[in-house]
Amino acid sequence: MYKLLSGIAFLSLLITGCSNSYQKETSRLDLIKERGELICGVSGKIPGFSFLGIDGKYRGLDVDICKSFAAGILGDSYKIQYRPLTAAERFTAIKTGEIDILSRNTTFTLSRDSSGGNGLSFAPVVFYDGQGLMVKKESNISSIEDLKNKSICVGSGTTTEQNINDVFESNSLPYTPIKYQDLNQVIAGYLQGRCSAMTSDRSQLAAARSGFKIPENHIILRNVLSKEPLSPASDGADNKLADALRWIIFTLITAEEEGITKENIDERLKLAKNNPQLKSLRRFLGVDGGLGEKIGLRNDFTVNVIKATGNYGEIYKRNLGEDSDVPIPRELNQLFKNGGLHFSPPFN
Amino acid sequence: MIYKMHQKKVKKYIEKIKEILFLNSLNNFLIILLIFTICIFSLQSFSSVIFNSKWSVVTTNIPLFAFGTFPSDQSWRPIIWIVSLLLTSVLSIIPPKWKWLRKNLLFAWMGMIPLGIFLLYGGLGLQTVMSRNFGGLTLTIFLTVCSSMFALPLGIGLAFCRQSSLFVVKKLSSIYIDTMRAIPLIAVLFFGQLLIPLFLPLGLEIDRVWRAIFAFTLFVSAYIAEDIRGGLQAIPNTQIESAKSLGLNQLQIIKFILIPQSLRIALPALTNQVIGLFQNTSLMSILGLVEFLGIGRSILANPKFIGQYIEVYIWLASVYWIICTILALMAKYLEKRLKIA
């Protein structure tokens, strides 16, 4: 018995000893480079953002963001492992190091960002969303007030559920929430007529509507119930990785501001190399200034990123543009100079 | 001649059916009414399914449903594994004439897991495939086979421990069994997926598939232990006494008397466990593994197939149904055969 107890004590010492020796202060960024592969947490179940194509490859805006991270950090946008995650698992997966970055329609909030909360670090917003309501046209509902005493389909366990409750309570409107586990079930419930309206982020409503048999029979109300800035996230304790992610997103936005696309990047690079007077372009494309090194990346990381996925506008157009399967008007997601919210600090 | 006999048989069946169903006029009336209502009901509810559904969502995604995101040029590997699984099960049910094969079936079964790991993960000359690429029916079968094959010996061990005369062993195993049976499966699975990685030292990581298999094994072994205990208790004590008087030692008694008989008695219950386990693997779809149900849900998110729930879920349900029915029939056949022996 004594032997057994001492054995257990020894084993537990060994395990805690191991865990201590592992927690060295190495950045995840170096780990990714060493591994030669980026592990990206995605949803895999959101039309337009991340979903499984017929060929078994993941596609969507969130997936393209993963690709630009891989291109920026490793120089190759194919060196990615995708991990499909549910809303409940996503933060644990980051904390435990199972994934390097999370690109999964995650709303940037204080409690998720703070070390007292989920302890994440958010990259710049890649999609400005807001919660909305969708109703059937024939129901003649045109605003939140019309939904008094009606039932509303909502996905549980997300900020969505909390927001709808806040809005209806503050307007003292009684309503019946009908909760479902995920968005696809919410849509099914709404189509089966279990509720008069369904609520989710407006992008997801638009995506869902594009799959309906007659999309024109459903309208998305003008009321925006919440701000939902969707950002990729990484572990909050790791500033080095967070910096790299931040500037890779800004690369996408700056490229659109400057009109640099997947097609003309080689041309622009040549132009920058041959013309010493194009100072800011040379800095941005890593010809001068050594900006990449300062955030632990190669100096020409911007070139790799743009070559892999194109600029932000191209990514948007490919996944959510008018000709895509899930057309969502750009509105807030335009560049600042076009009346939207996307803006990049200077590459200096 | 044969045809006539056949005809006679058919006639007999028809008469039997008439006897059962159309006994008197009130019965006739009630039955016709019932059939009529069922027909109307099914026409109402299924006509839209049959005539309006677009099955392209299933047909174009068959490779995804079968293998998930497994590299398509490597899909022969899961096929070989599943076929060899089927072959071994058929051989176990209809025993082959060759004695050596019959004797080595147990080893063949034990070899299934290493073979599966080799074929699915690759290595040793095969292209390596990460477990994140497992999916669809392959992953469902992998989870079921691995968990049940680990759980069976563990369950037998626990059952014997619970019957043991050593106080500590007995108490520990009964505490384990009772705790596991008191926790819902989904909680055990959440523990496996969310908490195990938190306990492990940073940098050490167990594959998500194996974490799921681990959780399933822990859970199912407790139930299997109880099923086996039922079998053990059904064996009369006199058998053990007579075996002892014949000079068999404890190991021999377990090997030749207790295990074969208790397994035979527990067979229906064990079948239940396997079918239950097979269906419970679908719970992993809400924990981020893209097994058969999970891949269905991922495909539904493809903008091209939004809203085609009915087709996908009917397809999923019928595949689950077919496989479970096959399992049940196999077990039934095995039971019959063992009874004669």
Image (cartoon, coloured by chain):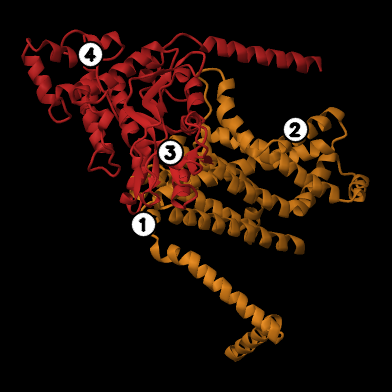
Chain colours: A red, B orange
User: What separation in Å lies between label 2 and label 4 (alpha carbons)?
Assistant: 58 Å
Label of residue B176 in the image:
2
Q: Residue at x 52, y 55 (%)?
A: B317
**In terms of sequence position, does the residue under pointer 4 or pointer 3 come before the other?**
3
Q: Viewer-nearest of labels 2 and 1?
A: 1
Q: Residue at x 78, y 32 (%)?
A: B175
Do the dots labelled 3 and 2 sit on one chain? no
Do the dots labelled 1 and 3 sit on one chain? no
The chain that hosts pointer 1 is B
Label of residue A299 in the image:
4
A310 relative to B182 in the view: left or right: left
Question: Which residue occupies the foreground of this view, A177 or B168?
Answer: A177
The chain that hosts pointer 2 is B
Question: Which residue occupies the foreground of this view, A46 or B336?
Answer: A46
Q: Say if residue B338 shows up in the picture.
A: yes
Label of residue A215 in the image:
none
Q: Amino acid at mark 1?
A: Ser
Q: Quadrant of the C terminus of chain A?
A: top left
- Tag 2 and tag 1, C-beta contact below 8 Å: no
Q: Amino acid at mark 2?
A: Tyr
Q: Amino acid at mark 4?
A: Asn
Under circle 1, the secondary element is: helix
User: What separation in Å lies between label 4 and label 3 (alpha carbons)?
Assistant: 55 Å
User: What separation in Å lies between label 4 and label 1 (alpha carbons)?
Assistant: 47 Å
B65 relative to A259 in the view: left or right: right
Above or below, comparing residue B83 to residue A205 in the picture:
below
Under circle 2, the secondary element is: helix
Q: Viewer-nearest of labels 4 and 3?
A: 3
- Tag 3 and tag 2, C-beta contact below 8 Å: no
Question: Which residue occupies the foreground of this view, B165 or B275?
Answer: B275
Q: Which residue is mark 1?
A: B56
Relative image position of residue A272 (x, y in whole percent): 10, 16
